[in-house]
Image: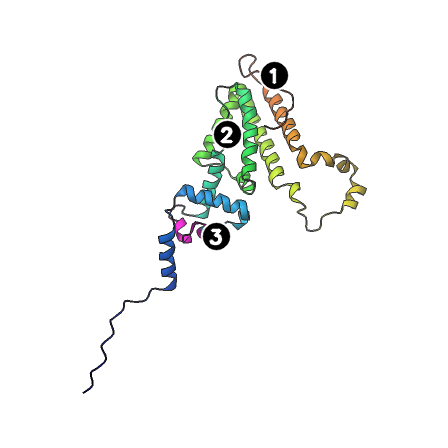
Amino acid sequence: MPSRDPVPARRGPRRAPSQARGRRVAAAAPALSPEGIVQEALALVAADGIAGLSTRKLGERLACEAMSIYHHFPSKQHLLDAMVDASIASLEWPDPALPAAEQLRQAMYAYRRMAHRQPALFPLLALHRLNTPTGVRFIERILGIVRQIVPDGERAARHFRTIGYFLVGAALDETAGYAKGPSAADPVSDEFIARECPNLVASARWFQQAEWDATFALGVEAMMAAVLRDAQPAGPAAIPTRPRRRAP
């Protein structure tokens, strides 16, 4: 009587392909950290713009499943908050031993440099209300410098706001403004501008990127002149305005 074929060894249930891929990715990926995720997200925004930020793309760059990111950031908004915080934290603060007026001047230039380090992120930062701990500490520090110069609380607050208008507007224009090209669906032609806009034609050379430093310096000194008009009459903060200069 012929012998029966041996019974094949029982195998466990087959893993779904997605599960297997997930385990391979988890084994190959380095340990995630909030700081590492934020830095990779900033790099992704620099490459693809803020509209290109997604947890799927970020997961691909980090060699992890998108859901792994949510262990560190409960939502995309939490991640965006952390990205804004990281940009603000990169601001190079002036030496606190300097006179307050010089601290304020240098802080304005530092803000501009911060905006240019992450130009694709800056439109988001400009509209962010900075109501995170990092954000409110940033506001408190700038406001504290202004209040060292201007003793009147109301005037100091108004100068702080005016400086903010200038810095945000200047940085938005330089990172996302006319230098990026037309944004209208049907932009006017050069011939139209030459025919209809003589003042724009006469001023156009001063709007070029090569002139931004001088224009920004003019704005900084206008802000400083206004602040110093309300400065306390004596003390280290009450120093004269300096002539216009190129950005450091």
Taking the spot 63% from the left edge, 27% from the top edge, the residue there is: 246
SS for dot 1: loop
Residue marked by disc 2: 92
Q: Earlier in the sequence, mark 3 or mark 1?
A: 3
Amino acid type shown at disc 3: Lys
- Total marks in image: 3
Say whether residue 154 is visible.
Answer: no
User: As drawn, which residue projects farthest toward the right?
Assistant: 195
What mark, if any, has residue 57 been given in the picture?
Answer: 3
User: As drawn, which residue projects farthest toward the front?
Assistant: 2
**Which of the image's four quarters has the N terminus?**
bottom left
Between 151 and 216, the residue placed more toward the observer is 216
Q: How many residues crowd mark 3 within 10 Å: few (<14), some (14–19), many (20+)?
A: some
Residues tagged 2 and 3 counted as in contact (Cβ below 8 A): no
Specify whether residue 66 is painted magenta: yes
Place residue 177 in its image quadrant. top right
Q: Which label lies toward us, 3 or 1?
A: 3
Lateral position of residue 51 relative to residue 194, left or right:
left
Taking the spot 64% from the left edge, 44% from the top edge, the residue there is: 180
Amino acid type shown at disc 1: Pro
Residue marked by disc 1: 240
SS for dot 3: helix
Q: Which residues are magenta?
A: 59-72
Specify whether residue 111 is painted magenta: no
Q: Which label lies toward us, 2 or 1?
A: 2
User: As drawn, which residue projects farthest toward the left?
Assistant: 1
Q: Marks 2 and 3, how far apart in space?
A: 31 Å
